[in-house]
Image (spheres, grey):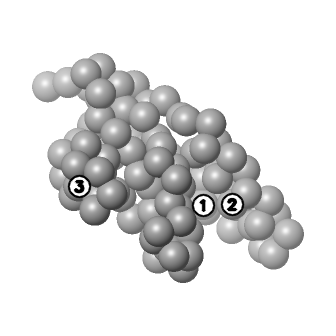
Amino acid sequence: MKSGYKIEWSVEAISNLDSIIDYLSNKWTHREIRTFYKLLDKTLILISKNPDIFSNSELKSNVKRCVLSKQTSIYFEVKVDNIVILTLFDNRKNPKSIRI
């Protein structure tokens, strides 16, 4: 069995992650930030090993969506030998504002 795809991050996804961490830093404690990172790491491992368990997004047929938390979804694309994290999206926003 394949050990997992390599994960790559788009510029947009990195910017989204930075925004999330800034928000958590201003509103919550270091404990919540660590909890978020643990959840993100666990989810990325799952995406890397089993990307097909996630449903295709409504945006594009080759883009998949993973719900990280009730506030955040991860949109990613499976390539031949890697996975590209396209964006981390705030589920409370209008879905039309997703930039992929």
**Amino acid under disc 1:** Phe
**Amino acid under disc 3:** Asn
Q: Residues within 10 Å of mark 1 (few under 14, many from 20)?
A: some
Residue at the (49%, 29%) spot, across then down: 8
Earlier-in-chain disc, 1 versus 3: 1
Q: Quadrant of the N terminus?
A: top left
Q: Position of residue 33 (x, y in %)?
A: 70, 61
Closer mark to the observer between disc 1 and disc 3: 3
Q: Position of residue 43 (x, y in %)?
A: 41, 51
Q: Whole-Å distance between the Cαs marked 2 and 3?
A: 24 Å
Residue tagged by mark 3? Answer: 56
Closer mark to the observer between disc 2 and disc 3: 3
Q: Position of residue 50 (x, y in %)?
A: 23, 42
Q: Whole-Å distance between the Cαs marked 1 and 2?
A: 10 Å
Residue at the (52%, 53%) spot, across then down: 99
Q: Position of residue 7 (x, y in %)?
A: 44, 31
Residue tagged by mark 1? Answer: 36
Earlier-in-chain disc, 1 versus 2: 2
**Amino acid under disc 2:** Ile
Is the residue 92 above or below the residue 9 in the image? below
Query: Pointer 1 and pointer 2: residues touching (CB < 8 Å)?
Result: yes
Residue tagged by mark 2? Answer: 20
**Count of picture labels:** 3
